[in-house]
Image: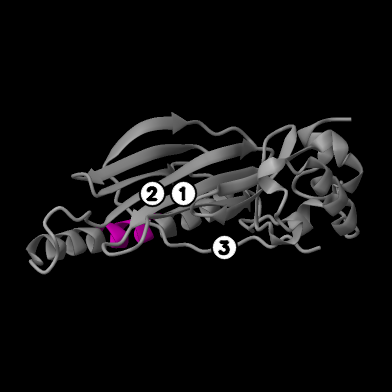
Amino acid sequence: MKIIIAITLLFAGFLISCNQTEKSTNDTISYIMKKDSVDDYFSASYPVITDTRPEAKIIKNIMDSIENFIKESKIGAIETNKSEKTDTSWIADVHFSYNYTDINVIYNKNNIFSISYSLDSYGRGAAHPEYFTHYYHYNIETGEVITLDDIFRQDYDSKLLSIAKEKQNAACKDIDIYEFGEFYFNDSTLFLSEKISHAEGYCEIEIPFSKIKDLVNPDGPLNVVKIIGE
């Protein structure tokens, strides 16, 4: 089984104010949270790396590229909103386009920096809004994206598949586990996540690391000793 990580970056926003600061330690990265908004049709929240250590600069470059996407998207949102307000071909009370982006740090230790990227947007004339959440995990030491293939031993596929099927809840019963493209984790649990549909939302499977201890690559970025101990 290959659980593919969908990596699609379509970020939006521009930096204005700071509301959170996290200091670095040897295996974490310091950052501040930035927010911006324009009226009720655009908002963005995202981390900006403040860490100046050499190993943090790799991650800073990644976050800088996100910031640039956000700036460009804000400009596009402003131009679109202007166009919609002057377009008399549409009914006056029709919903205008909007774009709300949230990028949050969800894991920042053990030399791993993970973010969730959530977008809620609507394009005028669309049948319904669009939303999604993607997860990105970076090795602080190398700047490389961490995948499930990095986390587990080479023969993990069938065993993880079997455990995941046991953990499927009612919301996930009709989902083929091969379709799962997103994952994230905390110190005790691996979460596999996949969007089912606009109406049904996400299917999420929780797998305690204690259940998959023998599958974790001891030399990998999510070393079982680091995460859940012996």
Going from N to C along the chain, the mark reached first, 2 or 1, is: 2
Q: Which residue is painted at 90% across and 52% down in the image?
A: 159
Query: Given the image, on which type of amino acid does mark 2 rest?
Result: Thr
- In front of the other: 153 or 62: 153
Question: Where does label 1 land, which residue?
Answer: 118
Question: Dot 1, crowdedness within 10 Å: few (<14), some or many (≥20)?
Answer: some
Residue highlighted by disc 2: 101
Magenta region, residue range: 67-74
Would you place residue 209 above or below residue 13 in this image?
Answer: above
Which quadrant of the structure image shows residue 85?
bottom left
Decide if residue 22 is on the left or right side of residue 97.
right
- Taking the magenta stretch, the answer to whether it contains residue 14 is no
Find residue 66 and report its horizontal and vertical position in percent.
Answer: 42, 56
Which mark sits nearer the N-terminus, 3 or 2?
3
**Residue type at tag 1:** Ser
Which residue matches tag 3?
Answer: 7
